[in-house]
Amino acid sequence: MVWESGRVGQQAWFAAGYKFGDYGPVRNRLYQTEGTNDPNNADVALGLAAIQIGASFGGDRSQLTQDIWSKICGGYGTLPAP
């Protein structure tokens, strides 16, 4: 998905990881889109995490939520129930 600014949203990186896996061409497209391959760049770091989470998604939404909690939000342990 492209935002109005022309930038690719993180859900697109999740989808790319899910469909194609976490491998060079997907990451290279992220780097090209962001204009850098610096993993310390916040957009690159978030895109890489989205690709990795997408690549490991097996359909379990509870595990997806847990992955986002730990890898994106920095949470630890089991995600608290709402």
Image (cartoon, grey):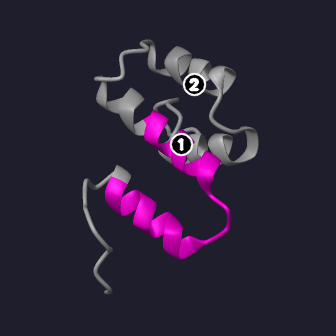
Residue 45 appears left or right of 64: left
- Which part of the image, by quadrant, shows the C terminus? bottom left
The residue pinned by badge 2 equals 27
Viewer-side residue, 23 vs 29: 23
Q: Is residue 51 magenta?
A: yes
The secondary structure type at the circle numbered 2 is helix
Question: What's the residue at 28%, 23% (across, down)?
Answer: 40
Q: Is residue 16 above or below residue 32?
A: below
The residue pinned by badge 1 equals 52
Q: How far from the left and from the top, in percent, is residue 36?
A: 42, 12
**What residue type is disc 2 on?**
Arg
Which portion, as a residue range, is magenta? 47-70
Question: What's the residue at 52%, 29% (across, down)?
Answer: 6
Viewer-side residue, 69 vs 8: 69
Viewer-side residue, 63 vs 7: 63
Q: How far from the left and from the top, in percent, is residue 19?
A: 74, 45
Q: CA distance from mark 1 to mark 2?
A: 10 Å
**What residue type is disc 1 on?**
Gln
Q: How far from the left and from the top, in percent, is residue 46?
A: 39, 38
Q: How far from the left and from the top, in percent, is residue 25?
A: 68, 21
Q: Is residue 26 visible?
A: yes
Q: Is residue 6 magenta?
A: no
